[in-house]
Image (cartoon, rainbow, N blue to C red):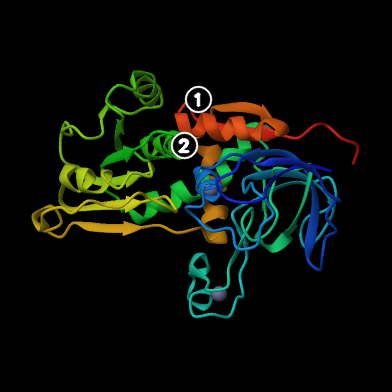
């Protein structure tokens, strides 16, 4: 099968012909229909997040057709394979409803070969049925940008005035969810990024502007999706008393120091890591009800490097999705 492989960090992915993977106990074999591109993939590519055992096929937002079933998935079913690929089920985090923090967790496209390929295998217990309303490409960004964005939104609490810092794949989804919940959304982007500011307003943000400038009014919560440490003091400075700032990415540049008064008055600064299966089930039930619409840019699998570099440069709105060549099952 064709695949795009990370051989070593700091180098582009390499096109390769790999043997089709054989599903192990409890694993489904899926033909990849579409795989979303996530900023985490850039961090893996750049070596900012470690890939323990390269070479590795990246890609953790897989929409696939089940070829060999497992668990609740029959052949022909459409299945979503997310970042959380396996947990031990026994550590103190797993046994307290926090499998996202499992000490032995394995992640799709980091510890397990992912979806930048024609086929993938996945532990069926960690996969989700894809809501029928979504075509393959539009469903793909729900599986990480959507799921982890939704977890970040929940951890931000119920505040009405919500800031979104960085308006890419995750924010374009979470903006729609937050507006549907009756929140007021403020989108913070690079000062000169008028296209993204327009995009945010189209999706229901009532204001969009410079992430390092003043907010139009104090925020109750802020989600930081851009991997820029400088945004942490900026977001804290934009929040009201008891404001909550959630860092939603897996990696961020160093956070500059800031005066304690920006944290004082019971402001909260926290991160979000990974997802639980419950996050996935809840979000995939919520998304069609909003209904969340995703904007995607399609790249053929062999152009995965272009998708990643376009993500780095902010050359598309919403999310990038790679699509393998159509092949016989
Ligand atoms: Zn991701
Ligand atoms: Zn565990």
Residue at 38%, 49% in the rendered image: 153
Residue at 59%, 43% in the rendered image: 11
- Give the mark nearer the N terminus: 2 vs 1: 2
Toward the viewer: 107 or 98?
Answer: 107
**Mark 2 Cα shell of 10 Å, populated few (<14), some (14-19), many (≥20):** many
| SS for callout 2 | helix
Spot occupied by residue 130 in the image (x, y as percentages of width and height): 67, 44
**Mark 1 Cα shell of 10 Å, populated few (<14), some (14-19), many (≥20):** some
Give the quarter of the figure containing the C terminus.
Answer: top right
* Residue at far right of view: 328
Relative height, residue 297 to residue 229 (above, below): above
Spot occupied by residue 171 in the image (x, y as percentages of width and height): 41, 37
Toward the viewer: 280 or 314?
Answer: 314
| Alpha carbons under labels 2 and 1: distance apart | 15 Å
| Residue marked by disc 1 | 316
Give the quarter of the figure containing the N terminus.
Answer: top right
Residue at 54%, 42% in the rendered image: 38
Spot occupied by residue 150 in the image (x, y as percentages of width and height): 45, 48
| Residue marked by disc 2 | 173
Toward the viewer: 198 or 175?
Answer: 198
| SS for callout 1 | loop
User: Does the residue tagged 1 have its C-beta within 8 Å of any atom of ligand 1?
Assistant: no
- In the picture, residue 266 is in which quadrant? bottom left
- In the picture, residue 21 is in which quadrant? bottom right
């Amino acid at each position: 099968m064709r695949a795009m492989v990370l051989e070593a960090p700091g180098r582009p992915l390499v096109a390769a012909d790999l043997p089709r993977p054989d599903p192990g106990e409890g694993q489904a074999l899926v033909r990849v229909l579409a795989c979303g591109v996530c900023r985490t993939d850039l961090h893996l590519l750049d070596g900012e997040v470690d890939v323990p055992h390269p070479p590795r096929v990246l890609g953790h937002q897989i929409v696939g057709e089940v070829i060999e079933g497992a668990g609740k998935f029959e052949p022909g079913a459409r299945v979503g394979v997310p970042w959380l690929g396996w947990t031990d089920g026994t550590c103190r985090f797993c046994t307290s409803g926090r499998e996202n923090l499992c000490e032995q967790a394995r992640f799709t496209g980091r510890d397990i070969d992912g979806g930048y390929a024609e086929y993938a295998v996945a532990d069926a217990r960690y996969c989700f049925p894809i809501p029928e309303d979504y075509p393959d490409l539009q469903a793909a960004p729900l599986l990480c940008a959507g799921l982890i964005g939704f977890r970040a939104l929940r951890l931000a609490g119920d505040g009405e005035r919500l800031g979104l810092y960085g308006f890419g794949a995750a924010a374009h989804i979470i903006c729609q969810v937050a507006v549907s919940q009756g929140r007021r959304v403020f989108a913070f982007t690079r000062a000169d990024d008028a296209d993204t500011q327009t995009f945010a307003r189209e999706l229901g943000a009532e204001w969009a502007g410079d992430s390092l400038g003043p907010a139009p009014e104090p925020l109750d919560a802020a989600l930081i999706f851009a991997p820029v440490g400088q945004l942490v003091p900026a977001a804290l400075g934009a929040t009201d008393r008891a404001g909550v700032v959630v860092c939603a990415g897996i990696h961020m540049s160093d956070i500059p120091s800031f005066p304690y008064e920006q944290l004082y008055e019971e402001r909260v600064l926290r991160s979000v890591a990974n997802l639980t299966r419950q996050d996935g089930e809840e979000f995939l039930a919520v998304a069609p009800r909003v209904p969340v619409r995703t904007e995607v840019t399609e790249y053929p699998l062999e152009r995965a490097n272009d998708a990643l570099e376009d993500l780095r440069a902010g050359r598309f709105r919403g999310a990038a999705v790679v699509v393998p060549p159509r092949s016989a099952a």
